[in-house]
Image (cartoon, grey):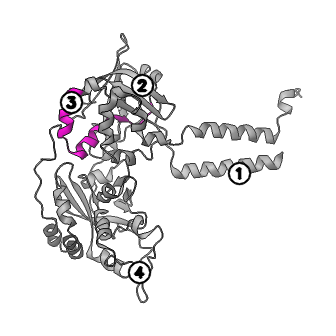
Amino acid sequence: MAPINPAISHITPTTTLTYFLLLLLATTTTTTPILAITNLTALLSSFPDFSSFTSLITSIPSLTSDLSDRSALTLLVIPNSYLSSSLDLTRRLSPSALADLLRYHILLQYLSSSDLHQVPPSGALITTLFQTTGRASSNSGSVNITRNPVTNAITISSPSPFSSSNATVLSLIKTLPYNVSIISVNSLLVPYGFDLMASETRPTLGLNITKALLDGHSFMVAASLLSASGVVQEFEADEGGAGITLFVPTDSAFSDLSATAISLQSLPADKKADVLKFHVLHSYYPLGSLESIVNPVQPTLATEDMGAGSFTLNISRINGSVAIDSGIVQASVTQTVFDQNPVVIFGVSKVLLPKEIFGRNPVLTSKPGNTDMGNAQPPVSALSPEKSPKMLSSAPGVREEIKSGVGGLQWLSTLHLLCVVFVCNCI
């Protein structure tokens, strides 16, 4: 038998678990989302040369909620001297259009200087935050990064061969490995097909939402609530810009709710308006966009009133239909009531209840004599799904985006605790 290496003979179960615990802590620390990601303006505040671009980001509070579940990104910033020629254009954009333009400058991967200089001459396709909105056609929400093998100059452009929008990397401004990288470029990037002339003065569709619901025959209660509350006028005013998406509960959905202990009629007028605004997204999302949506957590009109991160909806596909989770109930899209850009109205199977008003665990059991509706499953939509855009894989030579979901973090925390307890018992 071969002699045992003395170094190996001193390895005990306690030592092994200790090393394992240290390794696990080291490998998971870098995947945890950091506060800096959701506070880009604080990161840029020490760089006065980017004050104009910082002001643009500050003007769009919804970017904070967009980044709340991201653990790695690269922000492309434009110095004041290069941005000045484009400021007039950005001022004419509606807030929603400006937000999408800025999302195009947030790459969903951490890119270091070495990453950039390892990009192959053929280029690397990188997904941006704009791609996750579902409003980018095909891969127009991505950027193509190329490197000149002779000069080593790095160029960032739209992947479309017909686009004239491109920018050259000037320098690496700041990094927080491996979470945040800030890179300066010499020009504002515009997604292919993006209308820079779109403004808040864009002609609206002029749709009478109440009439459209009455014509749908199954939305009498919703039409009455919208009309009585006055918020329908606000919805119709928002038809310009990026448009709106309405999720309108059917009459049977309100009937099911009335059979529970929850009453919308007992709410104060302002809270009732918040519930109605909770059913509206401030962007035009036709069915195909909803089915292929990359970022499931979407702010609503109520989010804009109450603050980033609140009154959000989680949108996903379940059993072939679009499911909408409010944090309390899960509804499904049952039909398309109206769809003409920039307005789309969907019928949904349940009244969407925001947890900010009704709490996380409201009583949804039926009143005496009624069937319990608390565990009803969302109906399967009979609508035919449109073709979804293909998901982009990580580019060659560039680190893949690291994501850490809440469930994964909880599992790792539990594992850490078990390892610590076991080590203490072994010592």
Mark in front: 2 vs 4: 2
**Taking 94 as reference, is 375 above or below it?**
below
Q: In which quarter of the image is the N terminus?
A: top right
State which region is magenta.
84-110
Whether residues under marks 2 and 4 lie with C-beta atoms below 8 angstroms apart, the answer is no
What element does badge 2 sit on? Answer: strand
Q: Distance between the residues labelled 2 and 4?
A: 56 Å
Whether residues under marks 1 and 4 lie with C-beta atoms below 8 angstroms apart, the answer is no
Label 1 or label 3, whichever comes before in sequence order: 3
Residue at mark 1: 418
Tell me if mark 2 has few (under 14), some (14-19) or many (20+) residues whose alpha carbon lies within 10 angstroms of its own.
Answer: some
Residue at mark 2: 173
Location of residue 187 (image quadrant): top left
Label 3 or label 4, whichever comes before in sequence order: 3
Q: Distance between the residues labelled 2 and 1?
A: 41 Å
What element does badge 3 sit on? Answer: helix
Tell me if mark 4 has few (under 14), some (14-19) or many (20+) residues whose alpha carbon lies within 10 angstroms of its own.
Answer: few
Residue in front for this viewpoint, 137 or 186: 186
Label 3 or label 2, whichever comes before in sequence order: 3
Residue 132 on image: x %, y %: 34, 44
Q: How far apart are marks 3 and 4 (CA)?
A: 55 Å
Residue at mark 3: 86
Residue 316 on image: x %, y %: 38, 56
Which secondary structure dominates the residues rendered in magenta? helix
Residue 115 on image: x %, y %: 45, 24
Residue located farthest toward the bottom when viewing the structure as drawn: 369
Question: Could you tell me how many numbered marks the image carries?
Answer: 4
Q: What residue type is labelled 1?
A: Leu
* 238 falls in the magenta region: no
Label 2 or label 1, whichever comes before in sequence order: 2
